[in-house]
Amino acid sequence: MVIHSIMAQHRKSKDLFKLLLSLLVLLVVVFILQFSFFRWDLTSEKRYSLSDNTKELVASLDKDLYFEIYLAGDLPHGFTKLQKACMEMLDELAVYSNKRISYSLINPNDIANPKKRNAFFQQLVERGLKPTSLQEKTKDGSLKQKIIIPGIIVHDQEKETSIHLLKSVAGLSAEQNLNQSIEALEYELTSAIRLLQDQKPKEIGFLTGQGELNEYEVADITASLLQRYEVKRIGTKVLAQDYSRFAALLVAQPRKEFAKADKYRLDQYIMHGGKVLWLIDEVEASMDSLTTKESTVAFYKPLNLEDQLFTYGVRINPDLIMDVQGQLIPIQTALPGEAPKFTPAPWYYSPLLKTPNTNPITKGLNVVKAEFANSIDFVGKNNKLKRQVLLASSDYTKLEKVPVQISLDIVNRKMRPSDFPSGSRNIAVLLDGIFPSVFKNRAWKGIQKSTFKEQSVPTKMIVVSDGDIIRNRVRGSGNNRQIEALGYDRYSRKTYGNSSFLLNCVDYLCDDKGWMNLRSREVKLRLLNPTKIRTKRVFWQMFNLVLPLFLLLIFALFRFYMRRRKFARLRK
């Protein structure tokens, strides 16, 4: 008995020593971890890992940034997931920023007074946020409308900017749109941080002198660009004074031929690394002509840019694209003497262009509305050039060679898919690489040999064969002038993705650090099968209820058996 007592006491001392040693090791590990920093991201798509650019950006912050998250309160599951992803991303940013980033959740619906609540919502709209209306079921089964704000206000002590979190792409389910919103979080958050950090934004220019769209016709996109860049309206002479001054140049629907001197300055701007967003119409056609008469004639109107663009690797064809996926327009269908009656009909000359998810420029965008667009072909075999399609018509496309008469009567014709045999056609393309000069091996007295470059440094350009993509509608004149939102359709009350597409184009052209690649981030959407959920609901409920109890019972029996066996051995 004495021996057993001594052995038991020895075991207790040994166990106590092990416990104290384990606690000591744990305390040492905790102490060491206080002075070290690491993250383990075990997800397959590395959804919790920040890019090196992002880490460097937030580590260099020299002032505190505050994020006011208005996606708060009692939210549906999908929005709760977006809110959680946003908070997790901000937690990561805060760690790498040495706590210069902080955030708070603010629920506008907590304001009990309806008048004050509505006034607060209006204030948020004026600050740049967009409310979203939800339908939710109450306890009695009725539907109740709820307004939420899926957005963030970011500010320092001096200025602020807004972030709209929710992506809304036509044709995608609610789950897919929310997933794309999560994918875009790092890009949206870092864009806001860079906007507040930039002391001197880059300069971009709208080209003038060849009948381009006036300042009112590009007022909406200009207002959006001014939030990120300094925007100037310039001629080619100003451009040539310092080819490195302007980060990008927009050529928005010129209507006059380019003189050789202007072509030369444009060419040398590109050769010196300049980036250009071309929005070119090779065919003269306008919806305005159809507002006063039933038909108009579309005709080829070259701009003397054809050889230049051909040298760079593209050809804009003198044709018009007709697409089954066209915008709906109201057509008067009432008989003479009856009250006006308007019926929606597809306008094949205004294709709605889908935006592929294969490129950071177009990923997650709504469809883009074009009007009297031309087709684009890639030409030449420049191995130093990468080419990519950004926008294209649907598989059911017809090419109309010009001159051609355009009549509103076409909406009354019964068109079949076989009437659109041309297949998908390019409308916007990206060219990235090294370009040859169109003036190479040409004898022209205007060439300045001291600065002339026959070949560009690595640069990029985007060619869009429709100038109307950037044009907003203008109503009235003088003090009564009203600017419509770019891409807005008054009849359907939809806003297409024109503005977002063009902003992304400019951001991509001006991006010299690879920030736009963050838009390519992919988070896998792992959805449960709704059919299986419905048919096997009871099974999985019972499984989740019984299995834990069964495992607990097995563990208890095993524990009881081991204790009996242990004490039986001690008695012997």
Image (cartoon, rainbow, N blue to C red):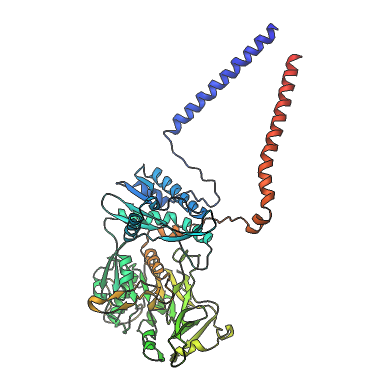
State the count of labels: 0
Q: Quadrant of residue 128?
A: bottom left
Looking at the picture, how far across and down is residue 73, in whole percent? 44, 50
Placement of 386 over or under 159, stated as above or below: below
The correct choice, above or below, for 131 with respect to 208 in the image is above
Residue at the image position 61 percent from the left and 55 percent from the top: 528
Where residue 166 appears, as percent x and y from the top left, is 44, 59
Q: Nearer the viewer, residue 149 or 178?
A: 149
User: Along the horizontal axis of the image, is 561 left or right of 485?
Assistant: right
Query: Is residue 390 in sight in this rendering?
Result: yes
Q: Nearer the viewer, residue 160 or 390?
A: 160
Looking at the rendering, which quadrant does residue 415 occupy? bottom right
Q: Residue furthest right?
A: 572
From the top left corner, tell me how far across and down residue 546 is, in percent. 69, 41
- From the image, which quarter does the N terminus lie in? top right
Residue 380 is at least partly visible in this image:
no
In this picture, residue 156 sits left or right of residue 332: left
In the picture shown, does residue 339 fall above or below 40?
below
Most foreground residue, 485 or 333: 333
Give residue 455's quadrant in the image.
bottom left
Q: Is residue 274 left or right of residue 565?
A: left
View extreme (top): residue: 2
Looking at the image, residue 399 sits to the left or right of residue 263; the answer is right
Say which residue appears at 43% left-offset and 46% top-offset. Answer: 92
- Location of the C terminus by quadrant is top right
Query: Is 225 above or below relative to 258?
Result: above
Q: Position of residue 321 (x, y in %)?
A: 47, 82
